[in-house]
Amino acid sequence: MRLDPFFEERLRVHRKHLFEKAAGSMRARLAALWPFPRVAAPTAAAEASAPSDAKASAPAPAKKPAGTTIGPRAQARARKRRAALAWDRTELRTVGVAGPDVPIVEHRVDVPGRPSVRVRIYYPPGAEDAPVPAVLAFFGGAFRIGGIDYPTTDAAFRRRAVDAGVAIAAVDYALAPEHQYPVQIEQGYAALQWLFGQAEELGIDPARIGLLGTSAGGNIGAAVVLMNRDRGGPDLKLQLLEVPVVDLTGAHLDLRATRALGIPRFIAVRELRSVARTYLPRPAAAREAYASPSRAATLEGLPPTVILTAEYDPLRGDGDAYGAALRAAGVEASVVRYQGVTHDTSIFLAALPAARRWHDDVVAALRRLHA
């Protein structure tokens, strides 16, 4: 199906960004190989004589806490995360829908041998009258950006809690590369154990708990489900995965999706590999089941699963393959592919009918927890 016209200008901008990023990487590699001395950096005197408009346009130096050193890579990551947060605010304002007011509580969960993790619970109306179903939720962001405070993420959790009548326990897992696999999996598993263990005090029904994960959060969530089974944890009633990446070896990437968007194969592969390199401490870890849940020795005993994918998303192959593997293992699993749309479709509620249908389908899946 043809790409929805809503995405045409966004695609043009995204392609330009990817080409510029690839060109910048190539220039950096060539510069590293250049055998001749580089031109010295401008002196303080030279900088002082620079035109005032050039000084005004220069970015302000990054602030750092006293007694600490922030390297150039850390500064670059901080800038990218600030830009991503600003972009997310704009997206919610221009093409998204703000979330309703709901009761919220936050907790800090200890994780043995790892950093503790913040969990925010969004309660639906009427939760004070009786225990409600719940899902442990993991946001997307390529393992390196995002968080439960991002406006579109927060808004989605609010809407889903209200429309599905389900408490959303959102896990603010640590970002890579500062924290790499398996930190995020252990944080998610500790949060799941805590949710079950404290269910009564939290107003949650422990017999009706599921899991929700989006994109990279789908990877983490699927791994937490595997770990819960492997460690003999309580039964989960649902696994809902949106555009998940479940094999970091790239074995199931469907690059026909990016080719149809006019993005060359080498650029798409480079971008997707960079995600795995950021998250994993070593390349070989991609073959481990908790890094790539679809590579688990067996998927038997996992909860009923709903997977949503997008036609113009190379991760559609991951979703298809994981759904097929689950069904082959005797798990109730379905995969729905949305035609004419891209990886981040679900945030465009104010502008795209497919996004509103996506929301309705997520809500319908979550309502299964009321059974």
Image (tube, rainbow, N blue to C red):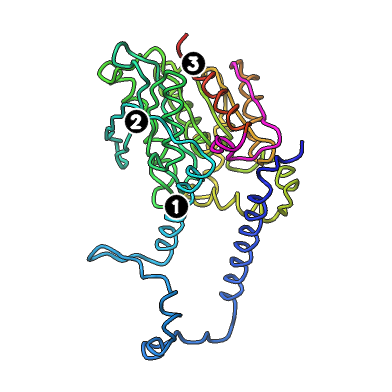
In this rendering, is residue 274 above or below 298? below
Q: Residue 367: which disc? A: 3
- SS at circle 3: helix
Mark 1, other Cα within 10 Å: few <14 / some 14–19 / many ≥20: few
Who's the residue at 41% across and 14% down the image?
A: 208
* Residue 277 percent coordinates (x, y): 53, 51
Which one is in front, 299 or 360? 360
Of badges 3 and 2, nearer the viewer stands 3
Which one is in front, 146 or 155? 155
Horizontal side of residue 306 vs 259, given as left or right: left
Residue for badge 2 = 190
Disc 3 residue type (three-letter): Arg
Of badges 3 and 1, nearer the viewer stands 1
In this rendering, is residue 6 above or below 69? above
Q: Which residue range is magenta in the image?
A: 332-352
Who's the residue at 35% across and 23% down the image?
A: 123
Mark 3, other Cα within 10 Å: few <14 / some 14–19 / many ≥20: some
Mark 2, other Cα within 10 Å: few <14 / some 14–19 / many ≥20: many
Residue for badge 1 = 86
Who's the residue at 46% across and 56% down the image?
A: 83
* Mark closer to the chain start, 3 or 1: 1
State the separation of the CA atoms marked 3 and 1: 33 Å
Residue at far top of view: 371
**Residue contact at pointers 1 and 2, CB within 8 angstroms:** no
* Residue 36 percent coordinates (x, y): 57, 86
Q: How many marks?
A: 3
